[in-house]
Image (spheres, rainbow, N blue to C red):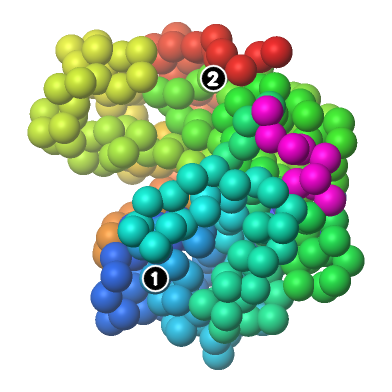
Amino acid sequence: MKKSNLGNSDLSVSPIALGCMSLGTEKKQAASILDAAIDLGINYLDTADLYDAGRNEELVGETIKQKRNQLVLATKVGNHLKQDGSWFWDPRKSYIKEQVKTSLKRLQTDYIDLYQLHGGTIEDPIEETIEAFEELVQEGVVRYYGLSSIRPNVIQAYLQNSNIVSNMMQFSLLDRRPEEFLPVLAEHQVSVVTRGSLAKGMISTKGLDIISKKGAEGYLDYEENELAETVRSLIHLLADGQTLTGLSLQYVLQQPAVTSAVVGASSPIQLEENVLALEQSFTAEQMEKVKKITKASTYQQHRE
């Protein structure tokens, strides 16, 4: 599987990353998915301290410890978990520098390849937050750091004041809001890592079935009927050997700055389908038609 560097870092990552949030909490199932991902050529794993109250990091750490040096391991920080299972937003330097120790222990490693701020608001003590990440890099426990935010004003603040190498953004055929910022991120040599690129499965091979079961409330600015009609129109574009999963992933991966798509999988079979989608090719004409079928929405909030 061809790999590309995240931003201006030397982290060489596969075009699909395994989103570990969907691994579940049982070791056997999680290990089967993680092992299958590695066997398929995926070297980029994305987790977070919040997932399953830390259990997700533990499962990842237990499974990959013998292959740690072959992988790019990413996790996130900023959601302060309390004893009762609830959490609050905490971007303070003191919390980040303390919490990284917990993540390292769970992941059974002495360094994190990519440490990401798991959100963020313009009201945060951004200078202090950046200082925490910079110090962790200097201390050698974090190789690079990034952002996980869809808020334009937060993204701009980090582009101007930090050394982030990546930003994770929800981006799909049904959520094209990031497109206005992709050229800016590319100009700053900051890679975009996408999440939600199959829109909860609504623009996967099983999209219409999922919409019929779970699409009653629509999706973002698509109402239920509009959502189903949009997916039918996308399916109509497909030629032999092409799938909606392939179209959805290839669309985001062809955009400026986008380096990898983080995709979850609840089974090795689903994971293999996502990887095989990378082998499909789509014409420029198909991609232009996609833009006419879907909405080019923009962010209305968090701009100042």
In the picture, measured across the screen, residue 53 lies left or right of residue 103, that is left
Residue 246 occupies which quadrant of the picture? Answer: top left
Residue 126: say if magenta.
Answer: yes
Whole-percent x, y for residue 205 in the image: 26, 41
Question: Magenta span covers which residues?
Answer: 123-131
Q: Residue at x 69, y 81 (%)?
A: 110
Label 1: few (<14), some (14–19) or many (≥20) C-alpha neighbours in 10 Å? some
> Can you say whether 41 is above or below 149 in the image?
below
Q: What residue would you read off at disc 2?
A: 177
What's under tag 2, amino acid-wise?
Answer: Arg
Q: Residue at x 52, y 53 (%)?
A: 80
Say whether residue 1 is visible: no
| Mark carried by residue 296 | none
Q: What is the magenta segment's predominant secondary structure?
A: helix
> Can you say whether 110 is above or below 87 in the image?
below
What's under tag 1, amino acid-wise?
Answer: Arg
Work out which quarter of the rendered image holds the C terminus and state it: top right
Q: Residue at x 80, y 64 (%)?
A: 136
